[in-house]
Image (cartoon, rainbow, N blue to C red):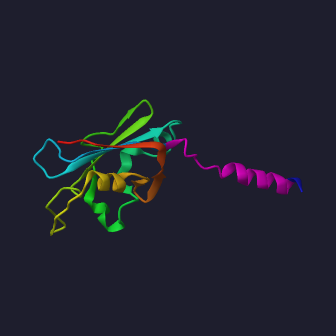
Amino acid sequence: MKKIIFLALLCICCNEKPKLDDYCVTKIEYSPQLKMMVPQGAIMVYIEDKNHILRDKCPLDKLTKVIFYSIKENSDCDFHLIKYQVEPFKIENNIIHLTILTARFWPDIYINGVRSENKWTPQQIQKVLKGDIGLVFEKDTVRVKACNNEQFIMHEN
């Protein structure tokens, strides 16, 4: 009987998952136009990592892409993570800063050889970008929930 109780306690203790309080998306900023002459905007994602769970458990330099769960699956190729070799991610005060380039919200652009006449309002962009994201490391994906106080900021250029 003692062995069964010991095994049950062991299973319960070992299956502890990170809590929402450990890491979450605190803020997303969208700049519709970069200072370069390319039709892309930049999305800055800020992830609070209080107990260094993401930093210690996940190799952030091996991050291949970021998934926005509120966007259809077939459009995730419209978002490109700035590679670690070009501009490394930053970690300041337990906040991880990630930069993502996209032409998804740019008006009147060619995407995958098809002309799109996008007319996104700031409210539509906010609705699409708010929420949970996925950090993809080769074959593994870590889901990062939105914090309760998540903010969306859209910069006007």
Give the residue furthest to the left: 37
Q: Residue at x 66, y 52 (%)?
A: 15
Identify the image quadrant of the N terminus: bottom right
Q: How many marks?
A: 0
Span highlighted in magenta in the image: 3-23
Q: Residue at x 30, y 64 (%)?
A: 75
Asked whether residue 11 is drawn in magenta, I would say yes
Percent position of residue 112, x then y: 19, 67
- 102 or 140, nearer to the observer: 102
Kindly indicate the quadrant of the structure image that contains residue 61. Answer: top left
- 58 or 76, nearer to the observer: 76
Kindly indicate the quadrant of the structure image that contains residue 108. Answer: bottom left
- 146 or 92, nearer to the observer: 146
Percent position of residue 10, x then y: 74, 51
Q: Is residue 10 visible?
A: yes
Q: Residue at x 45, y 39 (%)?
A: 48
Kindly indicate the quadrant of the structure image that contains residue 31. Answer: top left
In screen coordinates, is 5 left or right of 55? right
